[in-house]
Image (tube, grey):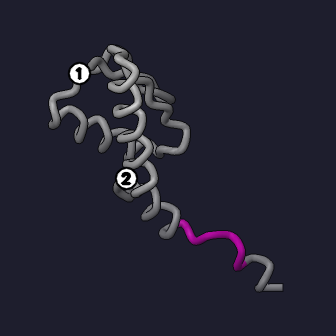
Amino acid sequence: MKNRYDKIPDYRVVKSAMQQELTDNQIARVKSEIETAVLQNKHRVYINLDDFNPNQKVRLVQVLSSKGYKFSEESIWSLLINL
C-alpha cells in the first residue's frame, strides 16, 4: 500500500524544482523567437510563458533586462519585447 503513495512527489522536491533556473529548452525557445522576429523584420517579439514557473519568469525578465531589452507588455502568461 505504501508504494501507491510513493508516486506523489515530496514537497521539498516540488519546491526545489520551482526555484530552478531557466532550462536549456526555454533558453533556446526565447533565442529562436528573437532571431525569427529579427529575420522577419518585426519590431516586437511575443514570448509565451506557459511552461515557465513564476521564478523562471522573473529570471527571464532579469536576463533580458540586463541585455538591454525593453518590454511593451508583461503578464503572467507572456512577454512582449520591443526590438
Mark 1: which amino acid? Answer: Lys
Residue 48 % position (x, y): 50, 32
Q: Count neighbours of disc 2 (C-alpha within 10 A) and say few if under 14, some if 14 to 19, many if 20 or more.
A: some
- In the image, residue 66 above or below residue 12: above
Looking at the rendered structure, the kind of residue marked 2 is: Leu
Q: Which residue is mark 1?
A: 70
Q: Label 2 to label 1, Cα distance in Å?
A: 19 Å
Verify whether residue 58 appears in magenta.
no
Give me the residue at 38% from left, 46% from top. Answer: 56
The residue range painted magenta reads: 6-11
Residue 12 x/y as whole percent: 48, 69
Where residue 64 sits in the image (x, y, percent)?
24, 35
Q: Earlier in the sequence, mark 2 or mark 1?
A: 2
Please identify the dominant SS of the magenta region: loop
Please identify the quadrant where the N terminus is shown: bottom right
Location of residue 78 in the rendering, given as x and y in whole percent from the top left corner: 46, 27
Report the residue at 68% width, 70% height from top: 8
Q: Residue at x 32, y 14 (%)?
A: 43
Q: Quadrant of the C terminus?
A: top left
Count of numbered marks: 2
Provide the secondary structure element on which disc 1 rests.
strand
Whether 44 is drawn above or below 57: the answer is above
The magenta stretch spans residue 9: yes
Q: Residue under circle 2? A: 22
